[in-house]
Amino acid sequence: MFGRRFEILRLGGVPIYLDFSWIFLALLLTLSFATQVMPRSLPDQPEAVHWLLALAMTAGVLCSLLLHELAHLGVARYYRFAPSGVTLFLFGGVTDGAEDAPTPEAELLTALAGPFASGWLAGACGLVFLSCSAAEAYPTVQLASGYLAALNGLIACFNLLPAFPLDGGRVLRALLWGLRKDFAAATRSVSSLGAGLGVLMLLVGGLFLLLGLFGIGLLCFALGLFIRFTSRISYQSVVFKRSLKGLPVRHFLRPEPTTVSRAISLAQLAQEHFAHSAASVLPVVDGTRALGLVTRYRLLAVPREEWDRQSVGTITDRISPESSIGPDEQAEEALAKMTRNGLPGLLVVEGETLVGLLTPADLLRPSPPTNPSAPHPPAASGPGPA
């Protein structure tokens, strides 16, 4: 859904990612704390201490967001649906696969777990702040706990806005799902509400900008864009994933794809394959045996003067369970693998034999099934959010 991300750790086998947008937030927070908050609150401390405290505060915000998402993850595990990862981004976090909740109750409690965790952390930091204030001691601890209490309170309140895919939107979807017994209709309703709320925040942000309140105006404007964009994309993602349910990979795969040998040079790869094609990924084979995938991105990462000296084998991503799938496995699982690992395609194999190639574009293409007896995918009905 979001931009590029990188894995920072794994908890219980679940990867935790940091979106590159968070780097912007980290720089902004650190700069604000070091140059404005700390000098004003702790004027007697040297500048180096201000910067160290600013870095510690930024790390505290990151840990707060992580705790929020891990609360979602823990409740999801309790209800036995397994999110494929957690991504921290500019305005919070997303638990990948959270829309796979099996019941409205599981959806409701999983959605509420994050704001509850943030509220609990805000209360705990608030108690530390009040204790230090009453004792008139530990000014740095008092300052840090006060700001973390306020920030966690804001995280909880922001996520409770009734805009999908924020937690408040998921709470509302769970309630509508339980009342209507229709998951798709509930998703469409809360996504439309989220898109409308995004427009309202854009208007409010524009009003603040006209009044000269540039800080809060830009914040409202950015939040409005974020909510409107994510409500649309999240709805489309849910409808798309549901349309794949029950359909095998065989239905979508590209049979007899163009393949390359690992022995050819990178210059040949560029001239004979990528130069005259829009393809971004190709299977690497030895006869009919699948060896792995080679991508345009990996090719361009190699200096051009090395292309005549290096072979395709040197930049091939070797075949693994995460980069391959069987033709009779579920298309949903194929999509989850590509999303989880950021792959441009999957090798479709039977044993070691290459059967075909599957890319995200293949899942979107309404082509007839390769197996005539296989059912056609259901069309995504109903309009998207406004």
Image: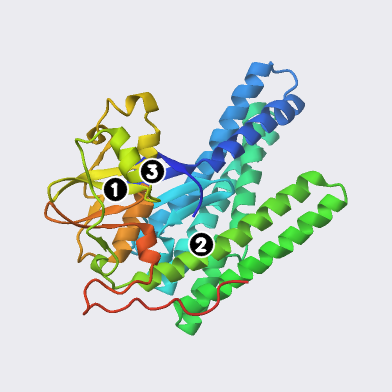
* 199 to 296, vertically: above or below: below
**Residue 282 got which mark?**
1
Position of 71 compared to 247: left or right?
Answer: right
Q: Inspect the image, locate mark 3, and give the three-letter code of the amino acid beneath it.
A: Ala
* 112 to 36, vertically: above or below: below
Position of 169 compared to 101: left or right?
Answer: right
Which one is in front, 143 or 46? 46
Instruction: Identify which residue is drawn at 72% across, 53% down.
Output: 220
Of callouts 3 and 2, the N-terminal one? 2
Q: Inspect the image, locate mark 2, and give the three-letter code of the amino acid beneath it.
A: Leu
Between tags 3 and 2, which lies in front? 3
Tell me the residue that label 2 is attached to: 112
Which one is in front, 267 or 117? 267
Instruction: Identify which residue is drawn at 83% across, 56% down.
Output: 207
Tell me where residue 32 appears, x and y as whole percent: 69, 32
Hey, which quadrant is residue 101 in on the image?
bottom left
Residue 160 visible in image: no
Tell me where residue 303 appears, x and y as whole percent: 39, 26
In space, the residues marked 1 and 3 are separated at their CA atoms by 13 Å
Between tags 1 and 3, which lies in front? 3
Tell me where residue 338 appears, x and y as whole percent: 34, 53
**Residue 275 got which mark?**
3
* 86 to 375, vertically: above or below: above
Q: Inspect the image, locate mark 1, and give the three-letter code of the amino acid beneath it.
A: Leu
Tell me where residue 165 appears, x and y as whole percent: 54, 62
